[in-house]
Amino acid sequence: MIITKRSISRRTVLRGLGATVGLPLLDAMVPALRPIRLSAASPTRRLATVYVPNGIMMDSWTPLTEGAGFDLPPTLASLEPFRDDLLVLSGLVHQTAYPLTGEGAGDHARAAACYLTGVHPKKTEGADIRAGVSMDQIAARHVGAETQLASMELGCDPNYFLGACDSGYSCAYGNTLSWRTETTPLPVEINPRAVFERMFGDAEDTSVAARRLRIQEDRSILDSLLQDVARLEGNLGAGDRVKLSQYLEAVRDLERRIQKAEQQSARELPAFEKPVGIPERYDDHVKMMFDLQLLAFQTDLTRITTFIMSREVSSRTYPELGIPDPHHPTSHHQNDPTRIAKLEKINAFHVGLFSHFLNRLRETEDGDGSLLDQVMITYGCGISDSNQHLHNNLPMLVAGGGGGHISGGRHLRFADDTPMANLLLTLLDKMGVPLDGFGDSNGQLHELSELS
């Protein structure tokens, strides 16, 4: 270590911290790279994951008939307007969510941790968590360079960071679906205002004037930071120079994104005012988070989102439904008709909120069609029968046309124990990321794009 009398000033440290912590914010302070409506010949596919917790009453979820013309059971009734854009998938299983010998309970944590990874998580309450790189992040690595944000991870329930949230499993497993590496889960943002600021900075709206002002401020901060770094670079030891080099890689990427913002600053974006904060009503909160995802897709700010409508083991109550009972205990219904009826009502309520998202996507023009024609959205849960904590015959929907790569309007029943990872592998392929395998997959689900 080389010791000198030079030091980094507090002002510089704060600037450096601001740039480092603020990187995701600055990445998203810019509009889309191009208006999607001008590129109809090359439709842009997007991938969204919507997750609901604590299992589903499968009798009220599963259609009685298969193929086209399937019936919509009570839980899915609100999706009738989107029947032709919908696939109901039966028979998929996450074997990796079941306990290994001696592990015992913890099905809720395992359900969330393996949902997009296909990997059995390490049972631990400590910091030595381990699962796998999630499907959405693999897709984000592939398409993220084309957008201002590689991905967005959203939720509605507060995160819990310390201790165990489910029978010996760290809360980290239930806090997110997205894993950047085997040991790095990505945080979920639940505040719509913070999501907007990540997308557009501290501007009050999406107007051209507000975005240009924000870009100018970012450029000023970045230029000043680079000047400070240049003065320091020649006076650092070898170890510090390595760290500084790694830091500068992120700064250069930030500079590239600001340059894109400057080039795109005159583009008109859909009018959207910065949210005040988290709405009091749950349904308003969910709809706002869906609307922000719509805006992100519409402006091509990102092409990958995950959204946890409520986290596993959630004890959220639903007074708007006349259900003051916490969700998680209610899901362990023990065949009590009263509890079953409440759980069915909660399940249908969640699906109804999802239909709001589908409707907004359908209303939004994109190329020669709508955003719904271009997206691929999965909606489901990592648990089927909540009473028994089953991970087979998972409740799964795929909505949207995937840029012509998904043929909807069908109920597809796969052979028992078909890996859920097969679906993840298939969706990656349709996003232009062909892999030989993923998790415990044993093939693709070609039926998603083949008429039966």
Image (cartoon, grey):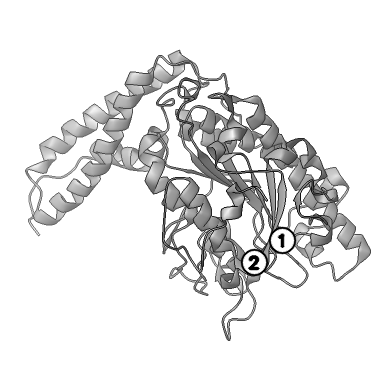
Of labels 2 and 1, earlier in sequence is: 1
Q: Nearer the viewer, residue 444 or 121?
A: 444
In the rendered view, tell whether residue 379 sits above or below residue 414.
above
Q: Nearer the viewer, residue 398 or 280?
A: 398
State the image coordinates of residue 113 (x, y, percent, origin top left). 55, 63
Q: Quadrant of residue 127?
A: bottom left
The kind of secondary structure element at disc 2 is helix
State the image coordinates of residue 220 (x, y, percent, origin top left). 28, 24
Question: Is 247 on the left-hand or right-hand side of 264?
Answer: left
In the rendered view, tell whether residue 5 sits above or below residue 29.
below
Q: Residue at x 86, y 51 (%)?
A: 323
CB-based contact (under 8 Å), mark 2 and mark 1:
yes
Q: Is residue 281 in view from this perspective? A: no
Question: Is 353 on the left-hand or right-hand side of 330?
Answer: left
Q: Residue furthest right?
A: 337
- Amino acid found under the numbered disc labelled 1: Asn
State the image coordinates of residue 29 (x, y, percent, origin top left). 42, 29
Question: Is 215 on the left-hand or right-hand side of 78?
Answer: left
How many angstroms separate mark 2 from mark 1 (CA)? 7 Å
Q: Residue at x 26, y 30 (%)?
A: 222
Q: Nearer the viewer, residue 214 or 288?
A: 288
In the rendered view, tell whether residue 429 sits above or below residue 144.
below
In the rendered view, tell whether residue 74 sits above or below residue 118.
above
Q: Which part of the image, by quadrant, shows the N terminus?
A: bottom left
Q: Residue at x 60, y 50 (%)?
A: 448
Q: Quadrant of residue 184?
A: bottom left
Q: Residue furthest bottom?
A: 102
Crowd rating for badge 1 (residues with CA inside 10 Å; few <14, some 14–19, many 20+): many
Residue behind mark 2: 108
State the image coordinates of residue 442 (x, y, percent, origin top left). 51, 67
Residue behind mark 1: 54
